[in-house]
Structure formats: structure tokens, C-alpha cells
């Protein structure tokens, strides 16, 4: 059986690791050894330990300051070591040594471009395990991630050239052929887009193979819904919030004022905030909610636009109020809003009264109908079949001659 390295370099919280966990379990059950390289071991360590896995810390650097928000994927790379060929050489060396020590025969890369580069230098095959954002379209230069903003072509091209310079410097030091384009970094044995075309961050990707979303990692607590403020049967609302979302208090205020029965999971919620909005029709959870229960029983979801949670509610035909905190989440929220299955609150918008947005999602049937149309399109979709398909393809990659 094979030694597989799951590589996670960029990102935060449990989203990436949680999404991969069902596949990791299946690979272990199939007899493979799964090694984990994670960028936030202090955050995900308890979760991995509870599943019986061990882990290593991924080589990373602190984000460097650059003018303005990231414009392309190349711009992201330049903020995390790719503006300095020497720094990138050090990062690649760390990944290479981890692959050597673990006897890696296949890399499953999840938002881990430097792992892609290290695997290329060692001629180890890679499956790019991506939600879409981390696998930009294969074009040169890499496209703008802000299509609503006019970015000069010269700026976009220069971002590619700058990152490519560092990449080729590293490849040269390891005696490897240089890349002609930065997009060549994503030329891997298999690109697994674990999403749906309607939710692809790159709306103009073109023809691609979408595997569909993976099932939940299976963690979470069930709970009883509180009674509405007026004692009547009212729509139920589930909210999954984070402190980095600038609209979190506006959501709490709106849910308290609306009077609808609500269940809220808000990790790290300040005690003072919980006390201020602790009313009988709102229940605050100290652990993650059982998503199977929430997607079945809630009428509306309010989230920070994580792809996994957003997809789960859309597959259940439930509309969403989306409050993204960064670009990746914003692009997901924008796709949902474009299909009319939810409302997007711009993260650059000053927090205000969100009660009208909640009332619209509850009272306007169009949002629910559009979410149900998405669910109907994929009614025959089986998330567990995706796991079987991925394991089968991984076995093929392992057995293929290299």
C-alpha cells in the first residue's frame, strides 16, 4: 500500500482539513498510510488526534505586505515567499524533506502550491485536491480574481513573471527543467475539482471535470430548536459566524429582533456579546452543529460563505445570507447571489441593519425556489460515491508508471 502525503499550506481554521477527512478515512480503510502536513497544527491537532492521525507542521512564511488586495493567484504567491527566490528555496526544501522522510508516493495538495513545486522537483505525482479557488485556469498570465475591477494587463503579466522567476530559480537549483508559464505549476497528474460548476470561484474557467462535493466529516451536536418569540410556528434560522466577519454583531442583533427560532454556532464568541444577545428564541452552541440536522430543519442559513457549509445548504434547497470575510469566500458568495439563491453582504460595507435581508430570505419565495432548483439539478448526486471515485482514481495514480 502507498504512503500518501496530504499537503495544506495556505488557509485557516478547520475548513480544509475537515473537508478532506472523509477521504482520508477511506484511504486509510483501503490500506494506505496518510501523512498530514498542515499549516495550523495548533488549530487542527486535536481534530486529527481524535481521528487517529499524526501530523507535521507545513513550511510557511508570514504574509508579506503588498499594496492593495491580491489581484491574481500569482499575487497571493508573492505575498507568501514567492517574491524572494531564496525564501522559496528554503520552503521547497522543507517540503522535499518531509516527502523523503515519509516515503511519499503520491501528494494530495490542498491549497499547497509549494508542495506542488517540491513534488515536481522530486518527480512525485500529485492530485490537486481543490475547491476551485486553489486551481486557477491554465492560462498565461493567471487571470484576475477580481473581474469587477479593471486591472491593466501589464500589471497581471508582471505578477506572473515575478513569481515565475523565483520558481525557476528553485527548479534550476534542483537540476529541473524551468517552467515556461507560471500556470505550469498546476500541471499535475490529476486535478480533482471537488465542487460544482455553479460554485466555481472562476466563473469563466471553461470546460473542466467537477467531482462534486464531499460529505461532512461527521462531527457536530444535535440540538432542540428554541420556540419563536411570539410562540407561533416560524421559520428556523441557523447561523455559523466568526469574529473576523465584521457583520457578526449585526447578524446577532437582526436575529434577536426578528424573533425567529435560531441556532447559532460562533466559536470564540466573546462572553459579553453572548450575554447581550441571549434571548429565549436564540440558542448558542459551544460545539459545531450537526450539519445534517441543520440542513434538513433550518429554513435559512447565515454563514461566512465557507464553500462546504454553503454547498450543504444549497443541496438541501435552502437559501443563504452570506457574509464573506476574505476574497475566496466573497467569490463563492457572489456565485450564490448570481444564481438568486441567497444574498451577499459586502465585507467592505459598513455593518448595518440586516433585518431586511433576513426578512427577504424568509418572505420572498424566489430565493428558496432558486436554491431548490440547484438541489433538484443534483438530486441524484451521491457524496459518498465521490469518495469511492476519488479512492479509485488515487489507486490508479499510485499504480501508474512514473
Image: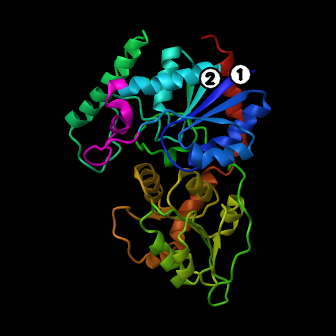
Residue 7 seen: yes
Whether pointer 1 and pointer 2 mark residues with C-beta atoms closer than 8 Å, the reply is yes
Looking at the rendering, in which quadrant would you find the N terminus? Answer: top right
Q: Nearer the viewer, residue 62 or 278?
A: 62
57 within the magenta span: no
Which stretch is magenta? 62-86
Q: Is residue 237 above or below residue 304?
A: below
**Residue 71 on image: x %, y %:** 31, 43
Q: Residue furthest bottom?
A: 230
Horizontally, residue 307 falls left or right of residue 168, namely: right
**Quarter residue 38 falls in:** top right
Horizontally, residue 201 falls left or right of residue 98, namely: left
Residue 382 seen: no
63 within the magenta span: yes
Q: Is residue 263 above or below residue 108?
A: below
Say what secondary structure mark 1 lies in: loop
Amino acid at each position: 500500500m502507498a504512503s500518501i502525503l496530504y499537503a495544506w499550506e495556505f488557509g485557516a481554521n478547520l475548513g480544509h482539513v475537515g473537508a478532506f477527512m472523509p477521504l482520508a478515512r477511506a484511504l486509510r480503510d483501503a490500506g494506505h498510510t496518510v501523512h498530514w502536513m498542515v499549516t495550523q497544527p495548533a488549530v487542527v491537532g486535536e481534530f486529527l488526534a481524535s481521528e487517529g492521525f499524526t501530523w507535521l507542521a507545513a513550511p510557511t512564511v508570514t504574509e508579506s505586505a503588498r499594496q492593495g488586495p491580491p489581484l491574481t493567484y500569482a499575487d497571493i504567491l508573492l505575498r507568501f515567499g514567492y517574491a524572494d527566490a531564496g525564501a522559496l528555496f528554503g520552503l521547497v526544501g522543507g517540503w522535499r524533506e518531509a516527502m523523503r522522510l515519509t516515503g511519499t508516493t503520491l501528494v494530495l495538495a490542498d491549497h499547497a502550491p509549494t508542495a506542488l513545486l517540491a513534488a515536481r522537483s522530486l518527480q512525485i505525482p500529485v492530485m490537486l485536491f481543490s475547491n476551485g479557488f486553489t486551481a486557477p485556469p491554465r492560462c498565461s498570465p493567471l487571470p484576475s480574481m477580481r473581474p469587477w475591477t479593471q486591472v491593466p494587463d501589464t500589471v497581471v503579466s508582471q505578477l506572473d513573471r515575478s513569481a515565475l522567476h523565483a520558481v525557476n530559480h528553485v527548479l534550476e537549483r534542483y537540476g529541473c527543467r524551468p517552467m515556461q508559464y507560471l500556470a505550469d505549476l498546476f500541471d499535475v497528474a490529476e486535478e480533482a475539482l471537488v465542487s460544482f460548476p455553479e460554485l466555481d470561484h472562476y466563473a469563466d474557467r471553461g470546460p473542466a471535470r467537477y467531482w462534486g462535493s464531499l460529505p461532512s466529516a461527521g462531527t457536530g451536536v444535535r440540538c432542540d430548536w428554541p420556540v419563536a418569540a411570539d410562540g407561533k410556528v416560524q421559520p428556523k434560522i441557523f447561523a455559523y459566524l466568526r469574529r473576523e466577519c465584521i457583520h457578526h454583531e449585526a447578524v446577532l442583533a437582526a436575529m434577536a429582533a426578528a424573533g425567529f427560532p435560531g441556532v447559532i454556532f460562533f466559536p470564540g464568541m466573546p462572553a459579553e456579546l453572548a450575554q447581550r444577545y441571549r434571548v429565549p428564541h436564540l440558542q448558542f452552541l459551544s460545539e459545531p452543529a450537526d450539519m445534517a440536522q441543520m440542513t434538513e430543519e433550518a429554513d435559512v442559513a447565515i454563514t461566512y460563505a465557507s464553500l462546504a457549509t454553503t454547498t450543504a445548504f444549497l443541496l438541501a434547497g435552502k437559501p443563504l445570507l452570506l457574509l464573506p470575510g476574505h476574497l475566496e469566500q466573497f467569490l463563492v458568495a457572489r456565485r450564490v447571489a448570481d444564481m438568486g439563491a441567497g444574498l451577499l453582504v459586502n465585507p467592505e460595507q459598513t455593518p448595518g441593519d440586516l433585518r431586511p435581508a433576513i426578512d427577504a430570505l424568509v418572505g420572498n419565495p424566489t430565493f428558496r425556489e432558486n436554491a431548490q432548483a440547484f438541489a433538484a439539478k443534483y438530486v441524484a448526486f451521491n457524496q459518498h460515491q465521490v469518495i469511492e471515485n476519488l479512492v479509485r482514481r488515487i489507486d490508479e495514480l499510485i499504480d501508474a508508471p512514473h
